[in-house]
Amino acid sequence: MGGITASSLPEQSKEFCTSVVIGEGEPLWPEVLRDFENGSLKPFYTQSPPGQFDLRDAPLPRFDLLDPTKYNRLTVQTSRGCPHKCEFCASSILLTSRYKLKPVEKVIAEIREIKKIWPRPFIEFADDNSFVHREHYKRLLRELANEKLRWFTEADVRVAEDDELLGLMRDSGCQQVLIGLESPPVLHGSSPGEGGRRATLDGIELKNNWKARQQDFYREAIAKIQSYGVTVNGCFILGLDADTPEVFDDVLQFVRNSGLYEVQVTFMTAFPGTPLYARLKQEGRIIRDKAWELCTLFDINFTPQHMSVAQLQAGFLKLVKELYSVEETHTRRRSFKRMLKVSPNFGRNTKREDRLLAA
């Protein structure tokens, strides 16, 4: 076993397998295979020093072994890590503290291998935060524009600051960016007890409170990105420490008013290895210690601060029914199409424009 959870809980993982790979897999996997062939698997394989694998040395995946008819997308990693450190995050920052880029030439080589089995593929760039180093990604996007593919990725709201980058995303086939908004920028009062929401993201990003400082720009960023024909999937976390029972309506109203094309809602989840899990355990708020089966994003494994578990569950279910109703979904789609028809930033790629307006 390997990956983020196994690396965070190696001793527990060992109960269910012969060997545990701790850290990034690429530098350890050849050794695992050699030991397997020799019948001498070790109980643990640990990357040393941790998190230092260079993506310039990443091997070319064997895409030729895949049957593309069984997939609605194939994944390519263009970077690893994230410059931010969110308390709840259980992504590749638990494997490496560095933000690392895969060379443009390697990314293009992987895409061309995919195109051998799927001529017009839909690609997910499996990054935690694309576009951190903008000049690198502008070079990549210029190359992608020649590959005739559709793709989506994850990024933060800073992508909206760069018109050149947005134009290159549009012209290279970007369909959607998933952005962790976490909580809507709504202000009802001065404290959580009064329904206050401004402090919801305060302290969530542990390096310099970056998330909290972006909230006021959410609407502007969504409008800017989507004006280029790139839809935004806004992700919200329910049950943050400043959340009150008003949060569910706050999310619904923000989604309606912001013009978001798509939305994703999940429970705050204390994953093993995260600062959030350590803090909630110290505070006695983990419902059942080591109940990793609750780490699904759709189960609750902690006691909320300003509402009961039952209130969080009920409010979440009610919100989901409203957000994903046929009427709400169609309204979001129609709003996006109306905006595109008058957007000055959309239309350079006529075929893509027609496809989006017909969707």
Image: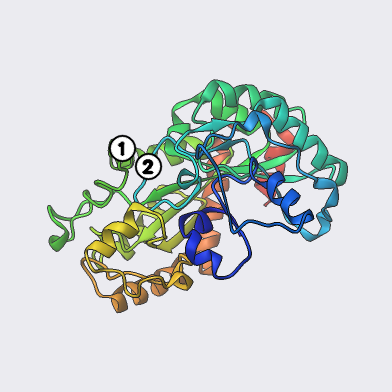
Residue 83 position, x and y percent, is: 42, 35
Say whether disc 1 or disc 2 marks the residue closer to the N-terminus.
2
Q: Which mark is residue 185?
A: none
Q: Residues within 10 Å of mark 1 (few under 14, many from 20)?
A: few
Residue 318 position, x and y percent, is: 39, 74
Q: Residue at x 75, y 59 (%)?
A: 39
Please tell me which residue lies in front, 315 or 356: 315
Q: Amino acid at mark 2?
A: Lys
Q: Residues within 10 Å of mark 2 (few under 14, many from 20)?
A: many
Q: Is residue 337 left or right of residue 97?
A: right
Q: Is residue 302 left or right of residue 27?
A: left
Please tell me which residue lies in front, 234 or 249: 234
Residue 196 position, x and y percent, is: 18, 55
Vertical position of residue 283 compared to residue 152: above or below: below
Q: Is residue 276 left or right of residue 38?
A: left
Q: Secondary structure at mark 2?
A: loop
Q: Secondary structure at mark 1?
A: loop
* Count of numbered circles on the image: 2
Q: Quadrant of residue 251?
A: bottom left
Q: Quadrant of residue 222?
A: top left
The residue carrying mark 2 is: 85
Q: In what quadrant of the picture does the N terminus appear?
A: bottom right
Vertical position of residue 3 compared to residue 149: above or below: below
Please tell me which residue lies in front, 61 or 194: 61
Q: Residue at x 37, y 61 (%)?
A: 270
Q: Amino acid at mark 1?
A: Lys
Q: Residue at x 72, y 25 (%)?
A: 105
Label 1 with label 2: CB-CB less than 8 Å: yes
Q: CA distance from mark 1 to mark 2?
A: 6 Å
The residue carrying mark 1 is: 207
Q: Is residue 122 left or right of residue 23?
A: right
Residue 16: tell me if it is visible: yes
